[in-house]
Image: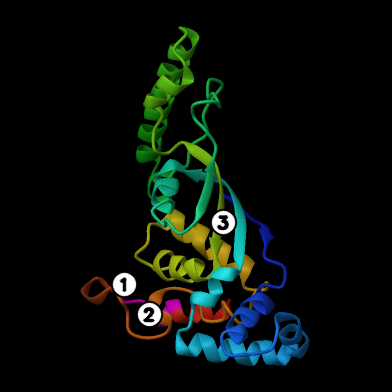
Amino acid sequence: MKVALLQHTPEPELTVALAARLCYSQVDIEALKERLSGADIKNFLDKIMSLGHQSVLEHASFTFGVDGISRVTSHQLVRHRVASYSQQSQRYVSHKERFAVVTPPSIAGNPEHAALFEAQVAALHAGYAALIEAGVPPEDARYLLPNATQTKIMITMNARELLHFFAVRCCERAQWEIREMAIEMLRLVGPVAPTVFAKAGPGCLAGPCPEGAMCCGKMARVREFFQGM
């Protein structure tokens, strides 16, 4: 899996601070901008974050390119609907040569399981290639492709949605692949907007585990990991 931060709102924290100050000021935007120093921005953002006034975070957006995730993960990802996605098409991109797959660690770590997995993938590939060779269009042959098939996707989320995404998908109970992706996304945005994402991560960082009886029981270790980021 490769995750890259491709673009983001220039000076995202300044943008968010301006939006927040605008709500409580009579002066024009240019004057507001001139008055905001680096220290003012941090202090003001700390205040609005602590108060939960997160609507202003929607003015800062971040675009990621992700390569090498499975269709399992992309199907979970698009459930986050306050976002924009562009995904590699299986209709126009043929996998005739050989489609790449993501093998879960629980399978890859067991030779017997790995052999079974690879045999099934090979059979599906042979069937897919045969259909393409017979003239079946890729948009129909793709019905044979497994959820393990690798894909590429571009994602744009605003800062508010990213905080929600991290709270849900950085959790220990999230599926392992989307969790790895979410953690890498958090690593990338942290330096760009350190105040906004200072406390980003699974829901248990700021209070009790929101999973209730389904809690992973690893809260101390989870908090240590994300605080170390």
Task: Give whichever of 6, 24 is nearer the camera.
Answer: 24
Helix, strand or loop at disc 3? strand
Looking at the rendering, the stretch of residues picked out in magenta corresponds to: 217-222
Judged by depth in the image, the label closer to the viewer, 1 or 3, is 3
Alpha carbon separation for disc pair 2 and 3: 30 Å
* Residue 216, numbered label: 1
Q: Is residue 31 left or right of residue 166?
A: right
Residue at mark 1 to residue at mark 3: CA–CA distance: 30 Å
Q: Nearer the viewer, mark 2 or mark 3?
A: 3
Q: Residues within 10 Å of mark 3 (few under 14, many from 20)?
A: many
Task: Please say if the residues under marks 1 and 2 sit with CB atoms less than 8 Å apart.
Answer: yes
- Residue, disc 3: 156
Side (left or right) of 31 relative to 122:
right
Q: Quadrant of the C terminus?
A: bottom right
Where in the figure is residue 96, as x and y percent of width and height? 53, 20
- The mark that comes first in sequence, 1 or 3, is 3
Amino acid type of the residue tagged 2 in the rendering = Met
Identify the residue position indicated by label 2 in the image. 219
Nearest the viewer among 78 and 101 is: 78
Q: Residues within 10 Å of mark 1 (few under 14, many from 20)?
A: few
Sequence order check: which comes first, mark 2 or mark 3? Answer: 3
Quadrant housing residue 195: bottom right
Figure quadrant of residue 190: bottom right
Residue at image point 44% right, 69% down: 164
